[in-house]
Image (cartoon, grey):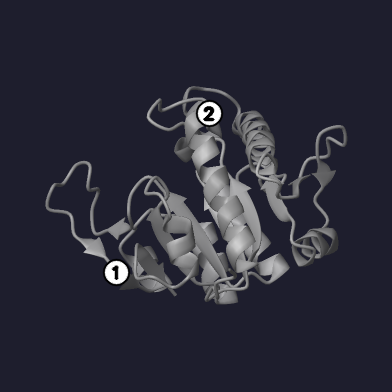
Amino acid sequence: MTEKPVYSRVILKISGEALSGTNGYGIDPEMIQKIAAEISEVVKTTNVEMAIVVGGGNIFRGIAGSAKGMDRGTADYMGMLATVINALALQDAIEKFEIETRVQSAIEMRQIAEPYIRRRAIRHLEKGRVVIFAAGTGNPFFSTDTTAALRAAEIGADVILMAKNVDGIYDSDPEINSNAKKLDRLSYIDLLNNSLRVMDFTAVSLCMDNEIPLKVFAVKKEGNIKRVLLGDKIGTSVS
């Protein structure tokens, strides 16, 4: 039975850390299988057009490398390659559920991924394929959050779904402050003014300029991706 989602085309942003499960690093096969199962179930039952931007922090984080003395440009390119590894792993997991998937890389590597071409990506989505955007923007000094905002604007996505390890945005770090308050709704200006680092300032500005709403929710709770798409009141909404 097809269910009616509140969005027709979405960008799902999955952090690299989410793919590591409880390990904190690398790819947890059980976790990636769980995420792939949810994505395939959503695509099959709602007919939503889904593109995915995946991070690489579970393998290598460019900004951390540069903090230890590595050239920032080199470190960021290494981080982009980490996102390609995650994208290929996610593609393999999703296709096991018989969902056609394409990886498009901002850095050309034709043996393993298509080059990023905006019109081709949109055509894939229209044909019901899941598109995974890898290698960030192809440029150093830009995060995968900025990639999600940029690709959302380019393909005309209705929303960016930020799949996190936490269940929304808090007024302070809930891991440090046990009295941190979860925020159900706020504006992009609130994010900037209060330095709530759910995404970097470049990504926030892109979303604000292009009027792209954002939903932040916990990816580890089973069924949450579908619940967000169907309009359930979970996580935090930013608009």
Q: Which residue is label 1 attached to?
A: 184
**Residue 54 to residue 239: above or below:** above
- The local secondary structure at tag 2 comes to helix
Q: Are marks 2 and 1 in contact (CB under 8 Å)?
A: no
- Side of 158 relative to 115 (left or right): left
Q: For the N terminus, give its image quadrant.
A: bottom right
**What residue is shown at x 54% (from left), y 63% (from top)?**
160
User: Seen from this angle, which residue lies furthest top?
Assistant: 69
Q: Nearer the viewer, residue 190 or 91?
A: 91
Amino acid type shown at disc 2: Pro
The circle drawn on residue 83 is none
**What residue is shown at x 33% (from left), y 49% (from top)?**
166
Q: Nearer the viewer, residue 29 or 211?
A: 29
**What residue is shown at x 34% (from left), y 72% (from top)?**
186
Amino acid type shown at disc 1: Asp
- The local secondary structure at tag 1 comes to loop
Residue 11, percent from left and from top = 60, 60
**What residue is shown at x 55% (from left), y 77% (from top)?**
211
Could you give the CA–CA distance between mark 2 and mark 1, rounded to whole angstroms?
32 Å
Q: Nearer the viewer, residue 201 or 98?
A: 98
Observer-side mark, 2 or 1, equals 2
Would you call the spot at circle 2 few (<14 residues within 10 Å), some (14-19), or many (20 or more)? some
Question: Who comes first in sequence, dot 2 or dot 1?
Answer: 2
Residue 214, percent from left and from top = 47, 66
Would you call the spot at circle 1 few (<14 residues within 10 Å), some (14-19), or many (20 or more)? some
The circle drawn on residue 29 is 2
Q: Nearer the viewer, residue 238 or 132?
A: 132
User: Seen from this angle, which residue lies furthest right?
Assistant: 110
